[in-house]
Image (cartoon, rainbow, N blue to C red):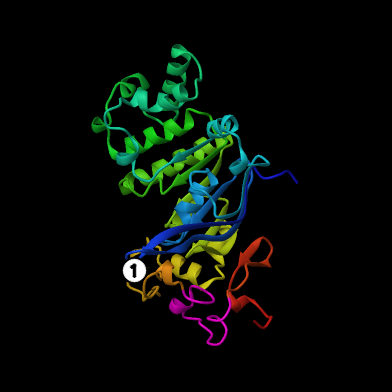
């Protein structure tokens, strides 16, 4: 079996927060996540806000320093890369961020925004860069590309701006892209088109994706595997079809139950809801962090010890005492 393109091993990311006038304490934004991503594979990370999804994506790109654990890209640990090798690593990876209005410089024309990575990395001459930029704009269906290239962002719609962000990521011909909520800021009519575009580009160029989303429905259609995170930890992981068809963790079950029902006849039925809000990570619950909101909570077990992520079905992992036979 070939080595994964991206490997995260027991990755932990802590942030320091102020406590009182002079004190501070750490919160575990990512708490011991292990994940492999093969070349050309799409892995979706889903969960509520504050689950650690974005921090995990930034750690995979080396944009935040890991407190513990290791991040490898193409068999090389990125934290140990010398400066020159770091620049080469940046050429092989890219990011598409959530808000196209914030990630695109309003004072740069579309052409300059897409060409900027090529200029920074010294790729090609002016003619070659122009060819690559126009091709990237064409690939993301911003057409006619020469006309779009000459426009400022305020003349583009939200969906067009996000396509521009995708073109900027694509122009470097990366092997790995972190897409952080890439469709959440565009209108509903554009979401399906953008996801179809990302899938087409991923298959055409064999790009590995880490797709970050709170919407497990879009994850099911875009990703091959789904990773469910809660309060910095992975609580379930497996093939996308298995996760959606047979969710094992109560949190995953609640996320799937919250997906809007397209059939009007079914909208009147009582649907289970997830009570409460995610806990403050500064004062995380003991044991399983989900136990204060869990309908299947087992007193004397769930609050005492954190369950271990284990394989309970072929390529289907879950961290829940409902699927353990061993005593804590």
Residues in magenta? 285-305
* Residue 259 versus residue 73 in the image, above or below: below
Residue 265 lies, in percent from the top left, at: 35, 68
Residue shown at the point (48%, 44%) measured from the top left: 63
* Residue 293 versus residue 44 in the image, above or below: below
- Quadrant holding the C terminus: bottom right
Residue 212 lies, in percent from the top left, at: 46, 51
Instruction: Say whether residue 131 is visible.
Output: yes
Residue shown at the point (59%, 70%) measured from the top left: 319
Residue 115 lies, in percent from the top left, at: 41, 24
Neighbours of disc 1 within 10 Å: few (<14), some (14-19), many (20+)? few
Write down the residue under mark 1. Answer: 267
Q: Secondary structure at mark 1?
A: loop
Residue 181 lies, in percent from the top left, at: 41, 49
Q: Is 298 a magenta residue?
A: yes
Instruction: Say whether residue 143 is visible.
Output: no
Residue shown at the point (42%, 68%) measured from the top left: 282
Residue shown at the point (45%, 38%) measured from the top left: 197
């Amino acid at each position: 079996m070939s080595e994964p393109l991206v490997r995260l091993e027991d990755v932990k990311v802590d942030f320091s927060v102020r406590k009182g006038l002079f004190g501070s304490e750490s919160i575990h934004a990512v708490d011991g996540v292990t994940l492999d991503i093969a070349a050309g594979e799409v892995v979706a990370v889903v969960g509520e806000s504050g689950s650690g999804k974005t921090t995990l994506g930034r750690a995979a790109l080396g944009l935040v320093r890991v407190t513990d654990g290791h991040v490898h890209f193409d068999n090389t640990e990125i934290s140990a890369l010398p400066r020159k090798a770091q620049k080469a690593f940046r050429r092989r990876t890219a990011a598409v961020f959530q808000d196209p209005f914030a990630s695109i410089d309003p004072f740069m024309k579309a052409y300059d925004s897409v060409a900027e990575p090529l200029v920074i990395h010294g790729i090609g001459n002016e003619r070659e860069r122009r060819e690559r930029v126009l091709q990237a704009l064409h690939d993301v269906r911003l057409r006619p590309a020469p006309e779009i290239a000459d426009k400022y962002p305020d003349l583009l719609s939200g969906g067009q701006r996000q396509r521009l962000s995708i073109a900027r990521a694509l122009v470097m011909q990366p092997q790995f892209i972190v897409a952080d909520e890439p469709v959440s800021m565009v209108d509903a009519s554009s979401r399906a088109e953008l996801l179809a575009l990302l899938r087409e580009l991923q298959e055409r160029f064999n790009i590995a994706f880490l797709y970050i989303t709170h919407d497990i429905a879009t994850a099911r259609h875009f990703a091959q595997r789904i990773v469910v995170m809660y309060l910095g930890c992975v609580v379930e992981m497996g093939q996308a079809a298995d996760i959606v068809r047979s969710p094992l963790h109560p949190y995953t079950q609640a996320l799937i139950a919250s997906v809007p029902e397209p059939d009007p006849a079914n909208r009147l039925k009582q649907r289970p809801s997830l009570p409460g809000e995610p806990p403050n990570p500064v004062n995380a619950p003991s044991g399983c962090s989900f136990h204060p909101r869990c309908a299947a909570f087992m007193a004397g077990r769930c609050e005492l010890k954190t369950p271990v992520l284990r394989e309970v079905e072929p390529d289907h992992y879950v961290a829940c005492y409902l699927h353990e036979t061993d005593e804590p």
